[in-house]
Amino acid sequence: LLAAATAAAPTVQGVSAERLFDQIEALGELSDTTPPSITRVLYTENDVRARDYVKGLMRDAGLEVREDSVGNIFGRLAGEDDSLAPVVSGSHTDAIPHSGKYDGVLGVLGAIEALRAIRESGVTTRRPLEALMFASEEPTRFGLSCIGSRAMCGRLDPDYLDTLRDENGTAFYEAVTSAGRGGGHENTASILSAALIPAGGIHAFVELHIEQGPLLEQEGLDIGVVTAIAAPASVSFDFLGNGGHAGALLMPYRKDAGLAAAELSLAVESWALGTKAIDTVATTGVLQVYPGAVNSVPRESHVEVDVRDIEEKRRDHVLDMIIKSAEQIADKRQCEMKYRIVNKDPPAPCADDVVAAVQDAADDLGFKSMRMVSRAYHDALFMAQIAPTGMIFVPCKGGVSHRPDEFSSKRDMENGVRTLALAMAKLAGV
Ligand code: GLV
Ligand code: MN
Ligand code: MN
Ligand code: MN
């Protein structure tokens, strides 16, 4: 009985919040904006430096490092039976413009710290363990989120990816290869297929992340045990009107593309509120007018809308209605309108076994926890398509995220990493 109890709950010691904090600060220096405002965009100079920094940390922690063709980086700790599929944990270090130091970063550095602690505690698990830094979770560069995890699970069409451009008109293939990635492959299709994880290739996946919401802090809890991840979608719109001189083009003759965009963003809000479900959210996060001069009637406008819900059907209905509104607004304002659904992903339920491992780990360590859903998306959304998946949330100050004042305390981060280490050890067997 004692042996069984010991096997179920190995002792992992030495998780250091100080080390984690110092690493988060060091990574925060690799930013296109001045910390604490963080901007780190896929395959840019600071992103490449962040990759090198993370690889160095993995080596220091005694992990064997490899990087795939897309730029997903793995740090591996061998298991007793190294032929078995690994238990994997990771997140991202890319950061949307003017965001904070913790989103994603905690899940990457925390996974490395968890594996270091497991190794230094002398615990050898039956299965190998891996810390993973996904190529990019944020949609900043190409408008599409989770490029690394979509590629790993085979849910990224190379022809579609090739149609996307960054703000300078650069395509994915050019960006990945000029950042020294791509594994020497000739085209996007072969880069993506080289990153594919075969069925059964991951035994279980757990992602540690700041909550990005206020519940844990409000309830005075240590750990959020995530049970599902909400379904994200995004759609972009372009309106084309006539434009002209702000003084000379009289009101009755205007086809104002800027006002079409303004009306659409109000429609987005009202369709989201219209479901009367607190779980429906819709955001117009990009709204641009061209040529963008005070004495020029907007000739063109570009709008990007994000729609999410726990219920996919309701999310899809809101998305449809927003598109219908855009058509009506374009009609009324005599503008041409084009739209494109950038992504429309299903929600992901977490796997019972992984939820149980996280819950048991939190309980064993005496942490106060609650079950919760993730309203933000994560690479875990896609890993759930190829492996039993779960997530661990820790509190963040005021529930704030995607802002420079994003913050999680050393104690909260340490609790999260200790829970992660124990959950991974349980899932990997001892
Ligand atoms: C990712 O940061 C998201 O938008 O949920
Ligand atoms: Mn984010
Ligand atoms: Mn994140
Ligand atoms: Mn996210």
Image: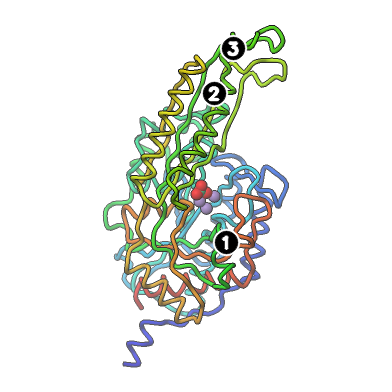
Q: Which residue is the site of mark 3?
A: 254
Q: Which residue is the site of mark 1?
A: 214
Q: Amino acid at mark 2?
A: Ala
Q: Residue at x 61, y 41 (%)?
A: 45
Q: How is the image coloured?
A: rainbow
**Mark 2–mark 1 distance (CA, rounded to whole Å):** 35 Å
Q: Nearer the viewer, mark 3 or mark 1?
A: 3
Q: Residue at x 54, y 64 (%)?
A: 215
As helix, strand or loop, the secondary structure at mark 2 comes to helix
- Whether residue 378 can be seen here: no
Q: Which mark is residue 260?
A: 2
Residue 95, image x, y percentages: 58, 47
As helix, strand or loop, the secondary structure at mark 3 comes to loop
Of pointers 2 and 3, the one earlier in the residue sequence = 3
Q: Amino acid at mark 1?
A: Pro
Density class for disc 2 (Cα within 10 Å; few <14, some 14-19, many ≥20) is many
Q: Nearer the viewer, mark 2 or mark 1?
A: 2
- In which quarter of the view is residue 164 placed? top left
Residue 51, image x, y percentages: 55, 50
